Structures are given as C-alpha cells and as structure tokens.
Image (cartoon, rainbow, N blue to C red):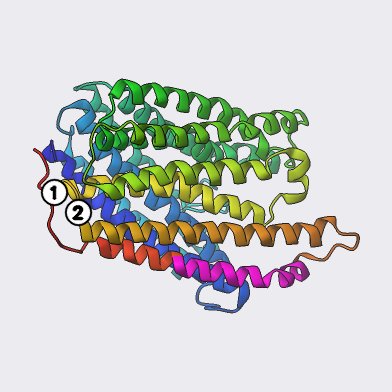
Amino acid sequence: MQYKSQAVAMPYFIAAIGLFVGQIIFGLIMGMQYVVGDFLFPEIPFNVARMVHTNLLIVWLLFGFMGAAYYMIPEEAETELYSPKLALAMFWIFLVAGAATILGYLLVPYATLAEMTGNDILATMGREFLEQPLITKIGIVIVALAFLFNITMTTLKGRKTAISMVLLLGLWGLAIFFLFSFYNPVNLVRDKFYWWWVVHLWVEGVWELILGALLAFVLIKVTGVDREVIEKWLYVIITLALVTGIIGTGHHYYWIGAPEYWQWWGSIFSALEPLPFFAMTVFAFNMVNRRRREHPNRAAVLWALGTGVMAFLGAGVWGFLHTLAPVNYYTHGSQITAAHGHMAFYGAYVMVVLTIISYAMPILRGRAANSNKSQVLEMWAFWLMTIAMVFITLFLTAAGILQVWLQRVSDSPMSFMAAQDQVTLFYWMREWAGVMFFVGLVVYVISFFVKGETQPAKA
C-alpha cells in the first residue's frame, strides 16, 4: 500500500461483499417463489423480495465503486486522500441508511413506509429500482456529494491521469443522473422517459466509464504494460460507450408513447452497443498477452479477463438479441430481458468490482497477493459463479423463448399465468443454478481467510 489513506477502501469492500451475499440470498428466495408461490408468504412477499434483491445490488455496487475510488485515486494522484475521516464518516452513514431502508422494506408495508418518510411532500417512491424512501434518496445525495468532494479535491492537489479523469467523469455522471429520481411527473410517458435517464444512463452510460477506469487501473498494475498504451484503449472504449449508450437509450422508448423515430434511433444505436464491450474484451486479453511481468496475483488477472468476456456476452450479445424494435415487439418484458439483465450486471459490474477487490484487498492486508491456496480457492469461486451465471442466463433465455411463443406468437395465445406454468421446469433449473452461484460466492468469501505463504507488498 503506497498511501496510508488507501486503507479507508477496506471497510467499503467488506460491506460490498456482505451486501452481495444478502442480494444473492434474496435472489434465491425469489427464484423459489417462482415455483412455490407461497414460499415465505406473507413474511416476505415476492414484490418485497424483488425490491430488496435489486436495491441490494445497486447499494453494494456503489460501495464497491466508492471503495475502488478511495483505493485508486491516491495512487493515480500520487498523494494522500484529501480527508480519510470524511470517507469513514460517509461509510457509516451510508451503511446505516442502507440497512435501515432494507429493514423498512421487510418490516413495514410499503404504503406505510411512504407515509412515514415524506413521500406526500415529494412523491418519488413506487418506481422500479428507485423504490427508496425520500429521506434515503436525500441521504444518498449527501453521501455522494461528500464522496465526490473528497476524491475530486484529492485529484486536484495531485497528478491528473486519464484513468482518474475517466473515473471522476463516471462518478460525477452517476450522481448527476441520480437527481432525476426526484422527478416523478404525473404523465406516465414522461415518467418512464426520465426514469430511464437514471436507470439506462447509469448502466449503459456513466457506469461503463467507471468499469473502463477500474479495468485499466488493474491491468496496468498486473501486466506492467505502458500506461500510454492502456490509456489509448480506454479513450476508444469510453467514446464507443458514450456514443452508443446515450442515443441507445431510445431502445426503452419503443412502446411507452414516445415518437416513432425512437424505434429507428434506438434500434440502430443500441445495436452498436456491443462494440465497446467487444473492444473491452480485446483490450483485456491484449494487455495480458503483452504483459512485461508475471504478477503474483493470478486471481485478479482471471477476474479482469472474465470481466471483458462476460460483459461482452451479457451486455453485448444478449442485449443485441432483443434490442431491435421488430424483435422487441415480441420479447419486451419477457424472461429474455431477465436473462440479459442477469449476465450483463454480473459481467460488467459485479466482476469488475470483484476484480479490484481481488487486486487491492491483499495489498491492504500487507501482501502482494494472497497465498497460492487462497488464490486456488478464489479461482474455483470464479468458475463456480461464472458457470452458474451462464446457466442462469441460458435457462432464463429458454424460458423467455417459450414464453414469447406461447403468449405472443402462437395461433392460440395463452394467458400470462398459463404460459408461466409451461416454463416451470426452466425456473427450477434456474434455481439450482442460483444455488451453485451461492456456493461459489461462499467459496469466494472463505478464500479471504485461507492462510499460507505470501509475498510482502512493496512499500
């Protein structure tokens, strides 16, 4: 660890992994409720389990991004963090607020929670992924502003690099686009229009900048390839991501009442969205092949390569499968969408956060890399989780294809629930794949506690 203040990243990483475990537990609960409808009812209704599952995903990834920034920015700026105390204070505020919100979802009826938290003053609740109470949203803004102030001031007083600038741009964009979560127009078309400015422009816009910066940082460290080479690739990737991703927002406007031209704009530009992910895959493998040294942290290298491949498959290939308007007319809102969402989030964001944790945590603990035994276990976790996610995606894709045929294409279309009965087998298979994913995650956590011979980290 080059700078003492980088140590503030550790609690963020630990919290991220803990919340990740919680997210997967609620994912398994939901998967069981698909096939056993009254499982844990009325204690945990399906809508509550889904809300907790998706909100935990967002929160733990934000913890991961913030921890990554606190670790990376001091090294990139070549100076200590502006205020380690502020970083730790915001950690506890964010963690307590997040935990209180999840407990609110689980223990209080949602309508009552809305009344208790000021939704009548400014109505922001009730929208998918943005279910957080008003006071939680305000808390997120406060934490984000303090975080951005901290890392921006650190950057301004030190060295400016392409990686730190791209990371800052992505993080500032994340905070700015979240402000649209406070805007909830009565008109449903306008509501959906601006809702996508948060959801889409996060995951297919500014988050891709964060992804690119994190991947570039780790690849510089583990390969020894010249910074100039990696930064040129980074510029290409983020340009492709922003050009395709921003206009590609139109693929969400097909059927919400927006003008017809969005079916053309959305189809064309979202069909190009696989390009930055393909470039990212080529980038990762190219840098590893050109490496000037064998880094002892083989697990981090594996996670970095896996990020490129799985992001391309999940966000690129599975996104393209149903992004063209004539295809989306039939597939919209089906399990094909769920298949794309699961692999895209895992490949693009879950894996890159695990990449930076895999690289940074050993160093934060005073070693260049974990022991060989620990890394072998971690790589087992990588393969278990990744293969499980591939199967989850394939089973959901099969369920989606059958669902589309039975509900929307056949000469005698079935009702939604009748079609769901016909795809139950795929839901059971998805649940078992989910159990396999959870086993992989448990193995990943255990790998941090496996001791063995390690190399000391360089000062």
Q: Is residue 420 visible?
A: yes
Is 424 in the magenta? yes
Residue at 58 percent of width and 33 percent of height:
273
Q: Is residue 107 left or right of residue 415?
A: left
Q: Nearer the viewer, residue 72 or 175?
A: 72
Determine which residue is flagged by label 1.
367
Q: Which residue is mark 2?
A: 370
Q: Main secondary structure of the magenta part?
A: helix
Question: The N terminus lies in which quarter of the figure?
Answer: top left
Q: Residue 56's spot in the image, x, y percent? A: 43, 57
What is the CA distance from the residue labelled 2 to the residue labelled 1? 7 Å
Give how far across and how far down residue 351 sits, in percent.
Answer: 40, 48
Instruction: Describe residue 266's horizontal placement relative to residue 16 as left or right.
Output: right
Please indicate whether residue 304 sits to the left or right of residue 364 in the image: right
Amino acid marked by disc 1 = Arg
Q: Nearer the viewer, residue 215 or 141?
A: 215
User: Does the magenta segment cover residue 384?
Assistant: no
In terms of image quadrants, where is residue 453?
bottom left
**On the image, which quarter does residue 414 sit in?**
bottom right
The span picked out in magenta is: 417-436
Q: Residue at x 34, y 22 (%)?
A: 229
Mark 2 vs 1: CB contact within 8 A: yes
Q: Secondary structure at mark 1?
A: loop
Type of the residue with mark 2: Asn
